[in-house]
Image (spheres, coloured by chain):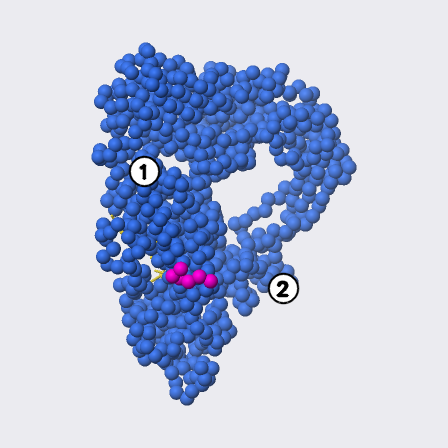
DNA sequence: GCAAGGTC
């Protein structure tokens, strides 16, 4: 590229109009820069003169808008019924410019014809490189002699851009190949599975989620399905959660200076006897000795500079904005010039960025302007060069304000919020961390260690401007090493492990980010797709639950033994792409291996399609009558329609029922106790029930869910004669918290009424009529319930605690003996008052030493199980302070189960094994 | 009517 006398025409192409404009501005130094329209209204053409290594150039700078081309199947494979979906693994595909990009293509062709060079300014990532080759293909087709060069830049900063143009390189074909492979694999897998499952399931079931199921598409994609998988997996985890009781010792000490709460350094124990032994040792020698007083300075650092994912996560957490909406609003702000490019992985500023200038712009703001002024005042010592999170997409800086605004008239509330977030986040990044003084005090009681901590914030620094974050501070009294005292309270408390919460949008983004599902620019699309396809729903707290459809699809593939809904497939593809992009594997090899495997997987999945049908059958009615329903074992002829048989079925939660095969025409159903773990129809018929024969069912109950007086194995009859079964249904309920085929307290087969079909029961208390997010039993600790008279959660009458006068909260018991029974408990943490709801109705005044499971707050400690549909989620749990001892003799010693002081719970005669 | 990836 040596200098020459003749001026050449150079066509420069950027990935988006904003980059074309920025590069043209930098290279021309805004001298002699002319702008004209191209054929596309968005993609202007900038013209200026420039010299590249002595070569005088007339520069034409224009842009595309992302990919110029799309990959498509050949015409004859595009219709859904044109071929077997399996053929899509070898059907010819081709790249072409779609209709809405034709005008950009024409601009490129026209300009390329009169140029000698083509310089590619696409983003410096794999997709950018691939777009570069699309541009090359279009331009070369009209000008075979073009010299093709690539500009590599890491930011739109003067020096970078001038350096890039003076050091042009060759485009990287490996990068582009990796994207070609990705595109082809995505297309073939996506189209084949989508067509297969849509055509298989759509017409066979009444899928009620869609308003018009003619347009229903049950799509499958290598990103959307793992995203759905995260949602379903968490949902299953919650359902499978089996609460486990644990024990912990708590200690508090009140002095003139205040109260210190000491936590047991063992955390908690699951072994009751062991906990009691230790507790008794402590109570017998309750003198506490201070063994350690540690004071240290703690720093809380401001967040890293803002990347797209962080913007989405924070907007979701702080404002409950969906990621999709956040990106729309951010795009608006970007287009109007108020913030920088919103799709960036970069979370560190280049040291060439003039950070002070960005802060200076904000000095006039009525709210945070004074903070910006303080930042710029060297005397204030507030400034700190921002740290970096270590991610760099080499194309864009972190999201930051680019223009001052104190709010524009056309902005919505969300525009204001998002701009404020971007500005405050930026100001926080260049600020000193908050400083706190933390005190940790450790004490020893009978050789058991406890600790308490307190924190005082010394300087808020960045927290002054970053109002979205807080740093809790609490004072504790002063203690001296070696000091001794008698605790004010020393209690043995029980708690129960709780399931994790549903995934929030922020959690979901983190899962995707971690597993490499999607990119910063597409993650919100995948989340939205789940909602659009009726695979998942989002509640007011931005938490996701799968719909019946979403759960059924994942369950179907899971039952096949495939992990098509897990992120592994995408990770493997990502690894292969990486290999292609560094030249370790060829595009052809990766394509052929991957597609061969996926085709085998597809064919096998099709062989096992009955799994998908079965899974769908659990959630949806069959439509039409052409196919026999998935049959169960016949128990008797239906006494209601007298035409079909009643069969034993297990629903998706692992709960059993006996339902009429003529459903939905006949809705007769018998719901079986929730404690049934196994059931099988025998060949023995009942002697008394008519019309016969009514075949007996061999039941196996989960022993810990039934009273000790009942046997775990039971040969029972659903015809109405079986007193044991009747009692167990009364005690345990039918256990069906899912929308089965009608949910009624029926044991007689004559009155099965379809009433709540598809209504989802609350996952915590298993009641219908509210969702899990509104569950009255979830008012943990309930210190926010202050109304007298009405319980705001349930709308039921509330009562006042007769001990301390605080309002009580209506909750649901969870113990083996009283599961489902309602009680009021005092909402004050200090008070143990409780009274059964039915006792209130009978005029009982309540008491203060309850059975297990009635006061305090639950712990999030969770022993997570794997997937389990039949899981016994006993609901969010309750704790009991059943002994309160210090200062008192050990008279608090009593059974937590029945309250009897003569024994401990492990020896309680009422306790199940 | 299908994917995911760019972008307006």
Residue A688 locus on image (x, y percent): 32, 11
- Image mark 2: chain: A
Does label 1 or label 2 sit earlier along the sequence? 2
Instruction: Indicate the quadrant containing the N terminus of chain A: top left, top right, bottom left or bottom right.
Output: bottom left
Residue nearest the viewer, comparing A716 with A275 = A716
Where does the magenta region start and end? A584-589
The percent coordinates of residue A826 (x first, y second) are: 54, 26
- Left or right placement of residue A743 versus residue A702 in this view: left
- Considering depth in this image, is A30 or A731 the residue closer to the camera? A731
**Residue A895 falls in which quadrant of the image?**
top right
| A702 vs A604: above or below | above
Indicate the quadrant where residue A415 lies: bottom left
Q: Determine if the magenta segment contains residue A587.
A: yes
Q: Is residue A117 magenta?
A: no
Q: What is the total number of numbered labels drawn onto the structure image?
A: 2
Q: Residue furthest top?
A: A688
Image height check: is A417 above or below A836?
A: below
Nearer mark to the viewer, of 1 and 2: 1
Using the numbered discs, state the Cα–Cα distance from disc 1 to disc 2 in whole angstroms: 71 Å
Seen in the image, is A551 located left or right of residue A495? left
Which chain is rendered blue in the image? A
Residue A776 in the image, given as x and y percentages of width and height: 45, 30
Residue at 29 percent across and 50 percent down: it is A86
Where residue A309 sits in the image (x, y, percent)? 46, 54
Q: Secondary structure at mark 2?
A: helix
Per the rendering, the mark at residue A610 is: 1
Q: Secondary structure at mark 1?
A: helix
Chain letter of disc 1 in the image:
A
In the rendered image, what is the letter of the chain coloured yellow?
B
Residue at the image point whose x is 44% and y is 57% from the top: A576
Residue at position x 50%, y 60% in the image: A346
Residue under label 2: A378
């Amino acid at each position: 590229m040596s200098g020459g006398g003749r001026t050449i025409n150079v066509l420069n192409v950027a990935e988006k109009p904003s980059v074309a404009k920025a590069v043209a501005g930098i290279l021309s130094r805004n001298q002699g820069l002319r702008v004209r329209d191209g054929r596309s209204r968005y993609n202007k053409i900038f013209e200026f003169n420039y010299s590249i290594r002595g070569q005088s150039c007339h520069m034409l700078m224009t842009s595309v808008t992302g990919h110029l081309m799309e990959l498509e199947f050949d015409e004859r494979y595009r219709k859904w019924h044109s071929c077997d979906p399996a053929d899509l693994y070898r059907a010819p595909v081709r790249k072409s410019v779609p209709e809405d990009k034709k005008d950009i293509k024409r601009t490129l062709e026209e300009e390329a014809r009169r140029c000698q060079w083509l310089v590619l300014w696409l983003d410096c990532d794999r997709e950018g490189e691939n777009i570069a080759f699309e541009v090359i293909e279009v331009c070369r087709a009209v000008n075979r002699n073009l010299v093709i060069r690539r500009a590599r830049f890491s930011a739109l900063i003067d020096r970078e851009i001038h350096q890039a143009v003076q050091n042009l390189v060759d485009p990287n074909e490996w990068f582009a190949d990796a994207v070609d492979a990705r595109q082809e694999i995505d297309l073939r897998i996506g189209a084949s599975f989508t067509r297969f499952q849509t055509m298989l399931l759509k017409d066979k079931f009444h899928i009620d989620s869609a308003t018009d199921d003619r347009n229903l598409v049950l799509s499958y994609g290598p990103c959307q399905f793992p995203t759905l998988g995260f949602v379903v997996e968490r949902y299953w985890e919650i359902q499978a959660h089996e609460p486990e009781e644990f024990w912990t010792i708590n200690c508090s000490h009140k002095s003139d200076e205040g109260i210190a709460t000491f936590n047991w350094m063992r955390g908690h124990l699951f072994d009751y006897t062991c906990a009691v032994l230790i507790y008794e040792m402590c109570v017998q020698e309750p003198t506490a000795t201070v063994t350690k007083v540690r004071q240290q300075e703690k720093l809380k650092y401001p967040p890293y500079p803002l990347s797209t994912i962080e913007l989405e996560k924070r907007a979701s957490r702080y404002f409950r904005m969906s990621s999709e909406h956040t990106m729309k609003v951010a795009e608006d702000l970007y287009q109007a010039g108020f913030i920088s490019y919103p799709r960036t992985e970069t979370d560190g500023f280049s040291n060439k960025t003039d950070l002070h200038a960005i802060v200076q712009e904000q000095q006039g703001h009525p709210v945070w302007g004074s903070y910006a002024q303080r930042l710029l005042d060297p005397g204030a010592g507030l400034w700190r060069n921002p740290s970096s999170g270590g991610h760099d997409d080499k194309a864009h800086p972190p999201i930051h304000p680019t223009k001052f605004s104190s709010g524009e008239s056309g902005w919505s509330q969300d525009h204001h919020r998002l701009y404020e977030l971007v500005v405050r986040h930026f100001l926080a990044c260049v600020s000193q961390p908050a400083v706190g003084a933390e005190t940790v005090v450790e004490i020893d009681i009978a050789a058991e260690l406890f600790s308490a901590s307190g924190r005082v914030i010394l300087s808020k620094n960045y927290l002054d401007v970053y109002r979205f974050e807080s740093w809790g501070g609490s004072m504790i009294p002063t203690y001296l090493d070696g000091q001794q005292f008698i605790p004010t309270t020393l209690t043995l408390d029980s708690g129960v492990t709780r399931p994790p919460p549903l995934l929030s949008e922020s959690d979901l983004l983190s899962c995707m980010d971690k597993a490499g599902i999607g990119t910063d620019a597409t993650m919100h699309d995948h989340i939205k797709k789940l909602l659009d396809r009726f695979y998942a729903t989002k509640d007011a707290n931005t938490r996701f639950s799968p719909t019946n459809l979403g759960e059924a699809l994942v369950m179907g593939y899971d039952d096949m033994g495939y992990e098509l809904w897990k992120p592994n497939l995408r990770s493997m593809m990502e690894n292969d792409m990486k290999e292609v992009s560094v030249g370790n594997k060829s595009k052809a090899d990766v394509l052929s291996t991957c597609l061969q495997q996926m085709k085998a997987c597809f064919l096998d999945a099709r062989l096992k399609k009955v799994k998908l049908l079965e899974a769908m059958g659990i959630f949806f009615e069959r439509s039409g009558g052409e196919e026999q329903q998935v049959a169960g074992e016949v128990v008797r002829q239906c006494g209601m329609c007298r035409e079909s048989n009643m069969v034993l079925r297990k629903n998706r939660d692992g709960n059993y029922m006996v339902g009429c095969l003529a459903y939905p025409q006949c809705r007769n159903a018998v719901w079986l106790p929730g404690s049934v773990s196994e059931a099988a129809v025998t060949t023995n018929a009942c002697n008394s029930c008519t019309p016969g024969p009514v075949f007996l069912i061999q039941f196996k109950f989960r022993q810990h869910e039934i009273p000790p007086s009942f046997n775990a194995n039971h040969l029972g009859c659903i015809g109405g004669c079986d007193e044991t079964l009747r009692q167990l249904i009364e005690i345990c309920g039918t256990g069906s918290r899912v929308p089965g085929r009608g949910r009624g307290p029926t044991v007689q087969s004559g009155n099965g009424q379809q009433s709540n079909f598809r209504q989802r029961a609350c996952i915590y208390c298993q009641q219908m009529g509210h969702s899990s997010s509104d569950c009255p039993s979830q008012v943990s600790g309930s210190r926010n319930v202050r109304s007298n008279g009405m319980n705001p959660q349930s709308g039921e009458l509330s009562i006042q605690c007769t001990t301390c006068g605080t309002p009580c909260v209506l909750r649901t018991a969870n113990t083996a003996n009283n599961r489902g029974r309602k009680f009021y408990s005092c909402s004050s943490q200090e008070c143990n008052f409780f009274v059964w709801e039915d006792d209130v109705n009978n005029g009982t005044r309540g008491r203060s030493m309850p059975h297990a499971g009635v006061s305090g707050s639950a712990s999030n400690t969770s022993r997570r199980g794997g997937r389990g549909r039949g899981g016994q989620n006993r609901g969010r749990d309750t704790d009991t302070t059943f002994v309160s001892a210090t200062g008192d003799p050990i008279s608090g010693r009593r059974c937590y189960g029945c309250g009897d002081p003569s024994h401990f719970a492990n020896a309680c005669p009422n306790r199940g094994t």
